[in-house]
Image (cartoon, helix red, strand yellow):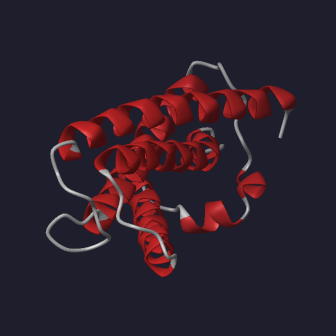
Amino acid sequence: MNDVLDDHIRTQSRLNFAINLVLNGVIAWLLVKDKPALTPWGEHGYGADLVITGFLLAALVAVFTIKAHRAKLARGEHEPVPSAALGALARVATGGDWGNSALFGLAGALIAAGTVAMLMLLPLPPFSPLAYAAFKGVWCGILAALVMPPAIRLGLRAA
């Protein structure tokens, strides 16, 4: 990969981390601020919320990023990325933009399920609403930043 593309990917990953940290943290706070402590599952559980968020966030970030970078490629703003440079991603992401974004969503849901499982194994007390909002903001920021590099490369994939 060239340095220009690497710099672009780093910038976009950082930007998406910050945006998703703030947006998802604020949304989580607004949704849970009046609830009692949150446990992984149950009436006031965060497990399902995190898994659903993982799917939707990864899928939406991916599809918007892929489509935006296809447009940039068409306008000549970036050089195409050869399929050989995509490695395993080129073999897995063979569908259209929406199909590929569903793969990102599935990966996001699996990451979320793994996160919930790890939190259940740790001897942690239930999350206060503020702690959960902060955790979810950071978690969403990290997930969005992780989605950016492969999504950008897919959007710039050579035809």
Residue at the (29%, 68%) spot, across then down: 39
Left or right, 79 with reference to 64: right
Question: Residue 75's image quarter?
Answer: top right
Q: Position of residue 56 (x, y in %)?
A: 32, 52
Q: Position of residue 6 (x, y in %)?
A: 78, 34
The C terminus sits in image quarter: top right
The N terminus sits in image quarter: top right
Residue at the (59%, 49%) spot, across then down: 146
Q: Return the residue nearer the eye: 86 or 120.
A: 120
Question: Residue 87's image quarter?
Answer: bottom right
Q: Position of residue 66 (x, y in %)?
A: 50, 40
Q: Position of residue 10 (x, y in %)?
A: 71, 33
Residue at the (51%, 75%) spot, across then down: 118
Residue at the (50%, 26%) spot, across then down: 71
Left or right, 39 with reference to 140: left
Q: Is residue 113 above or below residue 82?
A: below
Total numbered labels: 0
Q: Return the residue nearer the eye: 137 or 145.
A: 137
Q: Return the residue nearer the eye: 125 or 17.
A: 125
Q: Is residue 141 above or below residue 7?
A: below
Left or right, 55 with reference to 107: left
Q: Return the residue nearer the eye: 138 or 74.
A: 138
